[in-house]
Amino acid sequence: MSAENQEKKTEQQQPTSIILLGMAGSGKSTVLQRLNSYLHSKKQPPYVINLDPAVRELNYNANIDIRDTVDYSKVMKQYNLGPNGGIMTSLNLFTTKFDQVLGLIEKRKGSVQNILVDTPGQIEIFTWSASGAIITDAIASETPTVIGFVVDTPRTMAPATFMSNMLYACSILYKTRLPVLLIFNKTDVQDCSFAEEWMTDFEAFQAALSSRSATSTHESTNQSEEPSYMNSLMNSMSLVLEEFYANIKTVGISAMTGAGMPEFFDAVEECRKEYYSDYKPELDRLRRERQEKSDASKKDSLDRLMKDMKTDDDEPIESDASEEEGETLDAQDVKGGGINITNTSAQTQAFDDGTSWPRP
Ligand SMILES: Nc1nc2c(ncn2[C@@H]2O[C@H](COP(=O)(O)OP(=O)(O)OP(=O)(O)O)[C@@H](O)[C@H]2O)c(=O)[nH]1
């Protein structure tokens, strides 16, 4: 088999990771539950990861659940944090062990077709934190990854809410560099055709803006109360987002009734193709650049060290003192430059270091 065919075959065997993001209450967990049950009904059970440490009850069975590893309420108490700080710190602690999650994903690659990832309700904690970026990058470097941005369709009928969602989705696209699928959820309450029209027809969005208040989901009869700066700002934004609209995929679903599931997976398949054609080459290029930079900096340090050693003492160095005394360096000493990194008492209590991952 040629190398190209072999590569294609390996690509086909990779499961697709779908990371669900969205504003609080948009329905991420319900969507995940629906996707999970749909895939089970198709005899293609997915691998499910919950990254929300603060959720009380999950309405699906997660293979990996952050709550099994980090105790969110203990983290809050011991570090004196509020709810958002607690979620962020829990995610940071979990990220330190994410290599184990990747190991489990690696093992399941041949047997699952989809990996579903649920994220914390407070979207900014995941999208704008270092740990969120590390987790997303780690998953995306391991498997073809799609960001599923869940939108609450009935609420997005207000032009300002619609625009906020679009700007957020756009910022996530630029931040993660991964294919984004806009999931218009709750179509049992409100059909999403109006939003798709606003995305393709600028005049339709303008007409909606002039017939209702920017923050209202209904058409208004009293148009004089509309602040005109808001309308013109949103008109301009809509024009700016034209390029984004042209390249983004959308799908309407109802997590409640299960409508739109086949269309959802068709759209995911399209995004997966995009990942391989557009995103993966870019990710590989960035990774190569990072590697080259790190190699160059290592070589530079080594050269300087050799130079210093030569000027300090012109005689060649024959043996290391520790070797003479029969001591050996362990990996920890080498990596930490002799500094011992220890867990704080709070860390050891809140973060169960010895956890063997449940239900892998
Ligand atoms: N009618 C309708 N309601 C839905 C649908 N999907 C979710 N909901 C409701 O929306 C509310 C929020 O759903 P969740 O799944 O908790 O949303 P979430 O985004 O995970 O919430 P956080 O994690 O707290 O941000 C719940 O009351 C759900 O029952 C849907 O397709 N149709």
Image (cartoon, grey):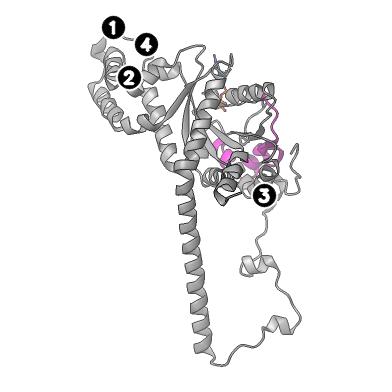
Q: CA distance from mark 1 to mark 4?
A: 10 Å
Q: Left or right of 324: which side holds 146?
A: left
> Which numbered mark, 1 or 3, is in the foreground of this view?
1
In x, y percent, where is residue 10? 61, 44
Q: The residue under label 4 is which amino acid type?
A: His
- The residue identified by callout 4 is 218
- Residue 5 against residue 21 in the figure, above or below: below
In x, y percent, where is residue 251? 48, 23
Residue at the spot 67% in from the left edge and 45% down from the top edge: 106
Q: The residue under label 2 is which amino acid type?
A: Ala
Label located before the other in sequence (2 or 3): 2
Label located before the other in sequence (4 or 3): 4
Mark 1 C-beta closer than 8 Å to ligand 1? no
Q: CA distance from mark 2 to mark 1?
A: 13 Å
Range shown magenta: 59-88
Residue at the spot 68% in from the left edge and 21% down from the top edge: 41
Kindly identify which numbered label has been placed on residue 221: 1
Q: Are marks 1 and 4 in contact (CB under 8 Å)?
A: no
- Residue 271 against residue 196 in the figure, above or below: below
Count of labels in the image:
4
Q: CA distance from mark 4 to mark 2?
A: 10 Å
- The residue identified by callout 3 is 347
Residue in the foreground of this view, choosing between 259 and 234: 259
In x, y percent, where is residue 171? 41, 37
